Amino acid sequence: MTTSQSLLPISTPRPPPPPAALAGSGATMLIRSERDHMAASAPASTRILISQSSSSLDLEDDRRIESVPFLSRTSSFTGSNDAALGSSNAFFKKQRRRRVSSDSSLSSSSGGSRSSSFRQDVGRAASETYLVTRLAVKLLGYLGVGYRWITRFLALGCYALLLMPGFVQVGYYYFFSRQVRRSIVFGEQPRNRLDLYLPKNNDGPKPVVAFITGGAWIIGYKAWGSLLGQQLSERGVIVACIDYRNFPQATIGDMVRDASQGISFMCNNAAEYGGDPNRIYLMGQSAGAHIAACALVEQAIKEAGKGQSVSWSVSQIKAYFGLSGGYNLLSLVDYFHSRGLYRSLFLSIMEGQESLGKYSPELVVQDPNVRNAVPLLPPIILFHGTGDYSIPCDSSKKFVDVLNDLGGKAESIMYEGKTHTDLFLQDPMRGGTDEMLEELISRIDYGNPEAFAEAANAPRRKRLVPEFMLKLAGKVSPF
């Protein structure tokens, strides 16, 4: 599957802690409430924010293997990497020529060809339906049809129904907004696609967030990031939601490669879409946070080695934001089993027991042979809710402690009582001021007074779902 060196593996806008605070290795906690903004600039690797609650082809047997402090980080790299970049750009140009050629032939077709196109669409829909059905049956073979999964699927249905008013509004934005460019091709594999969320204001290069969605490595999909994409694009940030193959269509190695290729595409093509190549950020949520961290650490290891050809560099990533992620699979496998992600299924996703360490970023960076890769990593900021029972918040805390002990730049920000989906779904749907979003924006706009002034004058987001439905959804949530 992979080469021997492959990876295992916000509150009002305010400036973040100064660079010196990030470099600290202490475990000091700063407790901050909405009423008590104390010592926000004190050195800390972990902060607890206390706020009042206002609440997805079969497994491919013939897989193709291919392939600061917020200080300014270089946005390009030279030398032996030029050839790799040239090859990557040649591939994307080829893809664009192929699409243009296809579009031209379609536009010159007659009415008879429209009928043929309709038949092709029907055939494609039938083929995809068959594929999804086959994958679902295969997945059920792992899950079984026991009481636990039946209740979880029912809970998921109730959860989705309660949040449906918000999903409908976000879905309308996703399909009909001119600011969304869907399914941009970045590779040759199935689902090598990404969605772009563009700001209305195009008065200059914008910061870019490359986002990897969650979904328990099974139901991840790029559209899951539409709410975040809408929020950030309204604040002048370009968001690229990168898709990747899920289990059982693929295993973790394929997911990491897909994510890495999508990141590479944005690093090398950001300017084409109005992005600032000097301000590219990487972000992941839940399983996506794990996949993105794997891709980032793997890339740093390649660059720390000699003679490794790369198509993007960690020096192009200004910071990594991890939301509710897990970074040590060995310590999580039993917990996931107790939560219904059974050991046999999880090990199949992760390519066996022997690969759990290889795809655990927290463990990988502690390997004496690769510790020289840690200083290459960008600043890492991990967000987590203390009420998260899908992935315990200790997962983020421990990863931060390890990185700081090894000379990295890492920080964890804890949100008291928040669950796995509060920070990503329920809180944004409440409208008004989103605490985590403001924290995120403050990091992205750090050192940019104009951006801070614009943020202060930004209109409050409207509520998407009534509060009582949000509270009910939190109670029935299977996450």
Image (tube, rainbow, N blue to C red):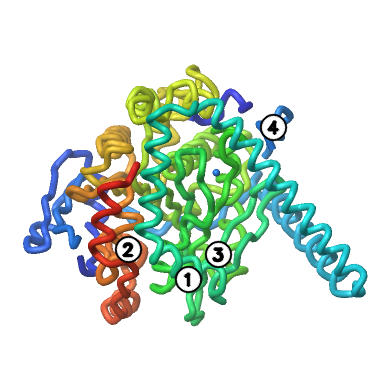
> What amino acid type is highlighted by mark number 1?
Lys
> What amino acid type is highlighted by mark number 2?
Pro
- Of badges 3 and 4, the one in the foreground is 4
> What amino acid type is highlighted by mark number 4?
Glu
Rounded to the nearest whole Å, what is the CA distance between mark 4 and mark 2? 37 Å
Rounded to the nearest whole Å, what is the CA distance between mark 2 and mark 3? 19 Å
Give the x, y percent position of residue 330: 38, 23
**Residue 69 visible, this angle:** yes
Choose top left, top right, bottom left or bottom right for residue 375.
top left
Question: Which residue is drawn at the image coordinates 55% and 44% (left, top)?
Answer: 56
Relative to 120, does residue 83 appear above or below in the rendering?
Answer: above
* Tags 4 and 2 touching, CB below 8 Å: no
* Tags 3 and 1 touching, CB below 8 Å: no
Classed neighbour count for the residue bearing mark 2: other residues with Cα under 10 Å, few (<14), some (14–19), many (≥20): many
Residue ID for mark 4: 60
Residue ID for mark 1: 206
Per the image, label 1 sits on a secondary structure element best described as strand
Label annotation for residue 196:
3
Residue ID for mark 2: 428
Classed neighbour count for the residue bearing mark 4: other residues with Cα under 10 Å, few (<14), some (14–19), many (≥20): few
Rounded to the nearest whole Å, what is the CA distance between mark 2 and mark 1? 22 Å
> What amino acid type is highlighted by mark number 3?
Leu
Give the x, y percent position of residue 84: 68, 47
